[in-house]
Amino acid sequence: MQQSKSKWLVLGTVSLAVFMAMLDITIVSVALPDIQKSFSVTFSSLQWVLNAYTLIYAVMLLPVSKLGDKLGRKKVFLGGLLIFIMGSIANGLSLNDTWLNLARGFQGIGGAAMMSLSLSIVTSAFPNKQRGLALGIWSSAVGLAVSIGPLVGGILVNSLGWRSIFWVNVPIGLIAIIFGSIFITDNQHQDTKKLDWLGLITSSIFVFGIILGLIQKESHYEYTWLNLHILSWFGLALIALIFFLIVETKVENPLIELSLFKSRTFVGANIAAFALGAGLYGVFTYLSILMQNYMGYSAFETGLKLLVISIFTLILGPIAGTLSDKIGNRWLISIALFIGTIGILVINSMLKVPFKWAALYPGFILLGISNAVLNPPISNAAMGSVEPRQIGMASGIINVFRQVGISFGIVILSISITNGYTSKITTGMSRITSLPTKMTDQLTMALHKAGAFAGQQIFSDPKAAAFSNQPAFHQIKSIVYQAFNQGMHQADIVIAILLGVGGLIALLLIKDQPRQLNKK
């Protein structure tokens, strides 16, 4: 056990590290236009600046957790920090998009080690009676990083250029390494048994196949779910999963003890983590697009608006962690997911064209409360339902569920928005009679090609200024905005279902037994 006076410094160190790791998932999005201009590449090719980090990050979460048990959590955590810093330096020095994408993938290895090992380090450092508070503070760092990313990115890009979003990691990372070297200690019994290489490989292929299949669907809207490019990756994931399950029942020292999933509480906590990632974290991307592309806010202004969500994480995260120690996790998790469901339905009921901030902030408040209350009891429930020797394993699993949830949510919401958008464009444009049919057809195709996230940019193009006085111009612009509104409404319903189902499952599966947990 960490000494009383140093455990809070341990918590501060790992919280700083996970804040940096999670921030790097969202901070890059606002820099993409500047990166595109710098390298003179298509915007679609820049998607891998985001996807390369996310893909490698998700794949490495389980392996680094096992390496932490094998080599020592402190060593692997600090090694992850060093890799993350080296990746950040390489990102800042990038001369082309290929270099940047490779460096982002390398950086994802470090991010996974920091994220996965930090949870097990905090869990081991604090006694049961203080664990909820500690995990609440840890969760505040995670939630704040996800929601504040666009604001921090906007400030850095506007003032220092896009490379600064990577350079800023270097001094912060070095501080975390120094403090981690001094205050983190390895007290767990290191696993001396043979490493489960087959489990390591098959689990990595499984996660890789799922994430890459989702990325393929996200990048190619025209693909159906049965398209060979998507189905082949999902098929690979399924085969890897089957082999993984077979291997884990045969080897002496499995990567994952499948008996973990006999615990209803552990399963419920992981499903809640998936719902959190898919619903709340997934929607941040599209709320940013709505505010920047359709409401006219800058990246900085969008980040300020999203603070309405993140500010609750700072205030309520530690409180929620303390409450999870006192009243248990079951009701906190379920109520928080239901609050998120209500929040997104409030936005759905108020959102209309012309888009106004007044339609968003009541729902933002509820989403902020949901996000703040959710993370601490999810982590507490998962880590409290396993044996001390399984903490590293459990940490990796719950982080995989959260990250796969984020990737799943982004893809499903993108599909929902695009379906609503294209449907409305088709019906709306077919009613325009003031233009020749051939021109209407060409405009319809152009708007479909531009897609929901860039359709409105046609009207800000200098070439469109010459037609701005034409009645059809304003009519088409109205159709595009109505189309995006319809897409957002469809996505809102999907989010509400994800959060609502997650809350119901958590209520049914998680056992609210704080006294039994505290006896461990």
Image (cartoon, rainbow, N blue to C red):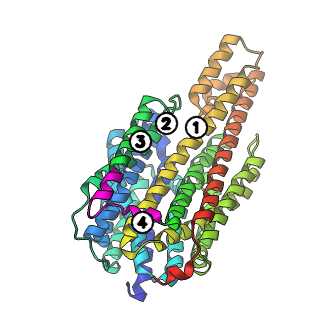
Mark 4 nearby-residue class (10 Å; few <14, some 14–19, many ≥20): many
Q: In x, y percent, where is residue 181? A: 30, 75
User: The residue tagged with tag 1: helix, strand or loop?
Assistant: helix
Query: Is 30 placed above or below 110 here?
Result: above
Mark carried by residue 394:
4
Q: Which residue is mark 1?
A: 415
Q: Quadrant of the C terminus?
A: bottom left
Looking at the image, is mark 2 or mark 4 nearer the viewer? 4
Q: Which residue is mark 2?
A: 217
Q: Which residues are magenta?
A: 244-262
Instruction: Depth check: give the residue in front, 346 or 153.
Output: 346
Mark closest to the chain's N terminus, 2 or 4: 2
Q: Residue at x 64, y 29 (%)?
A: 422
Disc 4 from disc 1: Cα separation: 32 Å
Q: Which residue is mark 3?
A: 212
| Left or right position of 344 against 385 | right
User: The residue tagged with tag 4: helix, strand or loop?
Assistant: helix
Mark closest to the chain's N terminus, 3 or 1: 3
Q: Quadrant of the N terminus?
A: bottom left
Looking at the image, is mark 4 or mark 3 nearer the viewer? 4
Q: Quadrant of residue 470?
A: top right
